[in-house]
Amino acid sequence: MAVDDAGLERLRDDLLTAINAALRDSEHRLRGGFTGAISASEARLGARIDASAAETRRHMGVVAEGLKSDIALVAEGVVTLTERLGAEMRAGVEVIDRRLLRVETRLLSA
């Protein structure tokens, strides 16, 4: 059986066609598999991000409540100190007023 150049050429073309078809089929299957895997991974990642965001919001709510309480405590302390300082200032001014009145009285009587 003699093989001519035309037969070899047809065989080569048929093999190339079959190989190309097999490669395209493999590529489509791989792309489909990757697309499915990526979609599933994306869904899992989205769920984890959502859960993390919810946990962060809860934590920040607790932190904010703690800060509100601390701020209220500091504000109360500032009010108390302001009142105490005001009372001490008034008492000090009264002492100075009495002393000044005595000095004026002595100066006027002399």
Image (tube, helix red, strand yellow):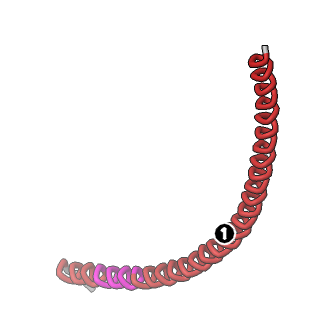
The image position of residue 64, as x and y in percent, is: 69, 65
Residue lying at 46% horizontally and 81% vertically, measured from the top left = 35
Quarter of the rendering containing residue 88: top right
Quadrant of the rendering where the C terminus is positioned:
top right
Quarter of the rendering containing residue 56: bottom right
Residue lying at 68% horizontally and 67% vertically, measured from the top left = 60
Q: Nearer the viewer, residue 86 or 104?
A: 104
Reply yes or no: does residue 20 show up in magenta: yes
Residue with the mark numbered 1: 56
Q: Nearer the viewer, residue 43 or 82?
A: 82
Q: Secondary structure at mark 1?
A: helix
The image position of residue 25, as x and y in percent, is: 39, 85
Q: Nearer the viewer, residue 4 or 35?
A: 35
Q: Residues within 10 Å of mark 1 (few under 14, many from 20)?
A: few
Q: Which residues are magenta?
A: 16-27
- Above or below — where is 23 with respect to 78? below
Question: Which amino acid is tagged 1?
Answer: Thr
Farthest-out residue, front: 109
